[in-house]
């Protein structure tokens, strides 16, 4: 993201930086309000809806990545167990299931207290990490909800992070 190094002003709003990152990646986005932006990012399994919102009171840039999921009611205990197992394997966010909206959700908050400014690289990494987590665990959620697998067996297919090159 070296092309984004021109952002240096202390007066730039965090959502302005997010908008610059989205434009750079050519993601479809909509600036919903001064403090909120929504975008669609294509993954391998599906298109993810990503919303970033700035809370000046809390000094937090909040990322929420969602995708539709409508599991059978009788499989909800297995889904919740897989969510707990998945959350044990991630460091920078967490999954939850919003049953009324039928959405799987990845949440992360970047604390920017003391007038700290997020860099385009940080924001790009936040979005990338959200997509990577959703892509990694999507098959597990599917197996837990519609497969005949135990939560532990469903987690066995979670792709681990790769380090290095082949």
Image (spheres, rainbow, N blue to C red):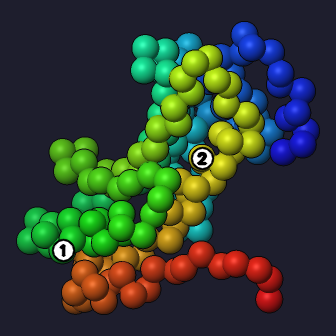
Nearer the observer: mark 1 or 2; the answer is 2
Instruction: Identify the residue shown where x is 15% and y is 66%.
Output: 76
Q: Are circles 1 and 2 on residues that touch, CB within 8 Å?
A: no
Is there any visible trace of residue 26 in the rendered image? no
Q: Is residue 93 left or right of residue 120?
A: left
Q: Quadrant location of residue 28?
A: top right
- Please count the marks in the image: 2
Q: Is residue 9 left or right of residue 84?
A: right
SS label for mark 1 = helix
Q: Is residue 39 above or below residue 127?
A: above
Quadrant in which the N terminus appears: top right
Instruction: Identify the residue shown where x is 49% and y is 27%.
Output: 60
Give the crowd class for mark 1: few <14, some 14-19, many >=20 residues within 10 Å: some
Label drawn at residue 78: 1
Name which of mark 1 and mark 2 comes first in the sequence: 1
Where residue 33 appears, as percent x and y from the top left, is 52, 16
Where residue 74 appears, as percent x and y from the top left, is 8, 71
Q: Nearer the viewer, residue 16 or 142?
A: 16
Q: CA distance from mark 1 to mark 2?
A: 28 Å
Is there any visible trace of residue 127 in the rendered image? yes
Where residue 121 appears, as percent x and y from the top left, is 74, 42
Instruction: Identify the residue shown where x is 56% and y is 27%.
Output: 112
Q: Is residue 67 left or right of residue 116?
A: left
Please identify the residue farthest to the left as the structure is shown.
Answer: 74
Where residue 32 appears, as percent x and y from the top left, is 52, 21
Instruction: Identify the residue shown where x is 60% and y is 46%.
Output: 126
Residue to which mark 2 is pinned: 126
SS label for mark 2 = helix
Q: Is residue 83 above or below residue 11?
A: below
Q: Is residue 52 above or below residue 142?
A: above
């Amino acid at each position: 993201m070296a092309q984004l190094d021109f952002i240096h002003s202390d007066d730039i709003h965090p959502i302005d930086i997010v908008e610059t990152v989205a434009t750079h990646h050519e993601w479809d986005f909509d600036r919903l309000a001064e403090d909120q932006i929504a975008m669609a990012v294509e993954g391998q399994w599906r298109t993810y809806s990503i919303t970033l919102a700035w809370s000046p009171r809390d000094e937090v840039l909040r990322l929420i990545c969602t995708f539709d999921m409508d599991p059978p009611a009788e499989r909800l205990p297995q889904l919740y167990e897989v969510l707990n197992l998945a959350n044990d394997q991630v460091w920078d966010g967490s999954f939850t299931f919003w049953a009324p909206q039928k959405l799987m959700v990845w949440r992360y908050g970047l604390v920017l207290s003391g007038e700290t400014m997020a860099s385009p690289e940080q924001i790009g990494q936040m979005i990338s990490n959200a997509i990577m987590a959703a892509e990694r665990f999507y098959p597990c959620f599917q197996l837990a909800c519609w497969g005949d697998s135990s939560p532990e067996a469903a987690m066995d297919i979670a792709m681990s992070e790769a380090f290095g090159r082949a």
